[in-house]
Image (tube, rainbow, N blue to C red):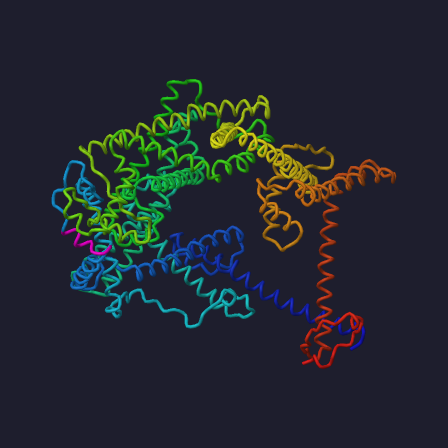
Amino acid sequence: MPSRLPIQDIFAGLVTSIGTAIRYWFHYTLVAFAWLGVVPLTACRIYKCLFTGSVSSLLTLPLDILSTENLLADCLQGCFVVTCTLCAFISLVWLREQIVHGGAPQWLEQNQQQPLNGVGQQNEAQAVVNGGVENAVLDQPANPAAENAVVGENPEIQEEQVDEEEEDNEDEEDAVVEDAADANNGAQDDMNWNALEWDRAAEELTWERMLGLDGSLVFLEHVFWVVSLNTLFILVFAFCPYHIGHFSIVGLGFEEYVQASHFEGLITTIVGYVLLAVTLIVCHGLAALVKFQRSRRLLGVCYIVVKVSLLVVVEIGVFPLICGWWLDICSLEMFDATLKDRELSFQSAPGTTMFLHWLVGMVYVFYFASFILLLREVLRPGVLWFLRNLNDPDFNPVQEMIHLPIYRHLRRFILSVIVFGSIVLLMLWLPIRIIKYLLPNFLPYNVMLYSDAPVSELSLELLLLQVVLPALLEQGHTRQWLKGLVRAWTVTAGYLLDLHSYLLGDQEENENNANQQANNQHARNNNAIPVVGEGLHAAHQAILQQGGPVGFQPYRRPLKFPLRIFLLIVFMCITLLIASLICLTLPVFVFSVFAGRWLMSFWTGTAKIHELYTAACGLYVCWLTIRAVTVLVAWMPQGRRVIFQKVKEWSLMIMKTLIVAILLAGVVPLLLGLLFELVIVAPLRVPLDQTPLFYPWQDWALGVLHAKIIAAITLMGPQWWLKTVIEQVYANGIRNIDLHFIIRKLAAPVISVLLLSLCVPYIIASGVVPLLGVTAEMQNLVQRRIYPFLLMVVVLMGILSFQVRQFKRLYEHIKNDKYLVGQRLVNYERKSGKQGTSTTPPQSSQE
């Protein structure tokens, strides 16, 4: 091998590499054109053709697909259509798995004997739940004692006559369906869901092979199938329901009302699905009468698909939308708005208005569910039996959608709307009316959508998103405070109404009962006070909540129990009203808004600021004050010396934190934002004949966002010194903060680089260039363009460095291809000090 490769060898290897790169480029271009061009464009054009409603559009469909008009818009719309069809396909496959593994509804069984056998097997399985629940049910008295009887869940259900019996029936039906399906799974394989047995691909496809990233052209067949599947799904799941709904609406004369909603397509499609579901269930009944088993199963499965789809739309789309609009209507007086204003906003931007109300409703539902989970941590297990436990691993809403009938879902939906709407009235509308009566000048809040001082507004938005919300939401102290308040209220209400045992349970009594049952199993039969803790309802709840936080604790039932429950509900409503007045309006919002306005006056002067920012600033001050007071109260029992020591330690830690915050959250973001302004924003927005204006607050705000993005990318990237330092700072935390390490390893290098990036171009443009005797126009040009020019130089140097490394790798690759004969493994042996200068490897170590 020569010491250097000949030029012709390098040139031949370079040509070969370029040819390989061009071949891969052509292949990946074809892949991108097929998946990002042909598939979405075809889907969009077919979608438009089907919904045009004319025969001529069908005849001109091939020419429309090849048309070059509105390519970008049609491709984007086609991507949305393809995404919808793909989600529909995945949902169908997942729903099929849910039906197969979760069991079929009882009304979809294939013969008359199978449901009866399923019920019998379920009764046998139910008899052994929780170690003989059936025996406990048979032994319980028919009329439990009314005075101070120790009861479990079953008497509670019996007292509330109608709803609780329906809940028992629900639980029994669910248990019957689940166990019957499991028991009959193996015996009826030949009869199990023949309509849903879809053939699967013989060979396992990887993503690279399916998309064509492995270099083969097999993906062209997949493109054809995807286009065909898109067309089929558009025809079946969009075209047919839409036209069914359209013909029905036109026939009933509701076309004008639907057009006035600005969502004609969506409402028409939903109406079509509703009519399709009714048609399917009617056809299913007719097929059952004439004993067409296959047709009956197929129609039943199609009805389940349509039913689950409509229920998902109602639960995820309609219900949060209703909550959002109800919240907006109940809070109109707080913002000095009217229904006419909301109507005008809806007419101007219907899609945005509906999305914002849906988003507000989703947030409301989420926080309501979080509060219910907090209540479960405080209250006795079984108090909230009528609410679904979202933490239960066996809770599957899709199975409920499959098995429960429509009227049950409709009843649950109406009950949820009533409960959520009543809470909004109680905690929002009524407090606003009281506040307007007591403090007429306090409302409305200033919620302008424009800003008199855009620079400060941007900084305040950053302050709200980056400082206030993480402190109020991500810290666990707020949740602990709320949990403590709920526990205190529960204890107070329990002792006032003699419902302490019902709300919180009797732990000591439960322990004594458990010990007594362990010592003598027949003590319960000899006791005059019956203990019924293992009723039928407990068995049903155990079936529904296997593995969940279930521990049905018995409670003591006082006199006039229904009246006490009614008084508890009234007391809860009064407490919610007072809590809304206290926590949301009077002290918190009065203090936070007034204190926030006072603090904001130092920041923005006389400019009007969105009340959200003033309330957020005041709330943060309130949170810091309450947190400091709680910490001091916790230190009180430890003595004055310990308090002084703690205050000294915390004062030192706060001083260190302030220094680090000034450097890393003040100086670094300001320099980074100013550099971004000089390099990117000013050259693009300000012409050469105008002078750019720099706003420090705005630059700092943008710099904080850029710094967070850079830090996140650094932590996700490869290991280097900056990532190591940031990880070390995160690991130390605030209490173990190392000021010397942060300044020496992080703040000083970063600030030095940023200062050099800002100062060196300025010195060159303002100090060196005038000495060269250039004109004023040239000096202005250099001053304005030197920052992006130096950025281009740095980027080019990086690209050249990368290309040099790539050429070295290519050089080694060409050399190895031409001259490398083979490789052999040689054992490494550490040489002694005397042989350290020897370079001849021992021959005995070669293999």
Give the overall secondary structure of the magenta segment. Answer: helix
Going by the picture, which residue comes out furthest to the left? 142
Please identify the quadrant where the C terminus is shown: bottom right
Q: Position of residue 212 (x, y in %)?
A: 53, 66
Apparent side of residue 553 relative to residue 62 in the rendered image (left or right): left
539 to 147, vertically: above or below: below
Please identify the quadrant where the N terminus is shown: bottom right
Let me know if residue 699 appears in the view: no
Which residue is located at x 43 percent, y 38 percent?
356
Q: Judge by depth and name the residue closer to the eye, 132 or 566.
A: 132
Q: Position of residue 669 (x, y in %)?
A: 64, 39
Q: Judge by depth and name the residue closer to the eye, 318 or 77.
A: 318
Which residue is located at x 63 percent, y 50 percent?
723
Which residue is located at x 50 percent, y 36 percent?
469
Q: Position of residue 511 (x, y in %)?
A: 28, 45
451 to 96, vertically: above or below: above
Which range of residues does the magenta coloring cover? 130-138
Apparent side of residue 705 relative to residue 51 in the rendered image (left or right): right
Q: Position of residue 826 (x, y in %)?
A: 69, 76
100 to 736, vertically: above or below: below
Which quadrant of the figure has residue 503? top left
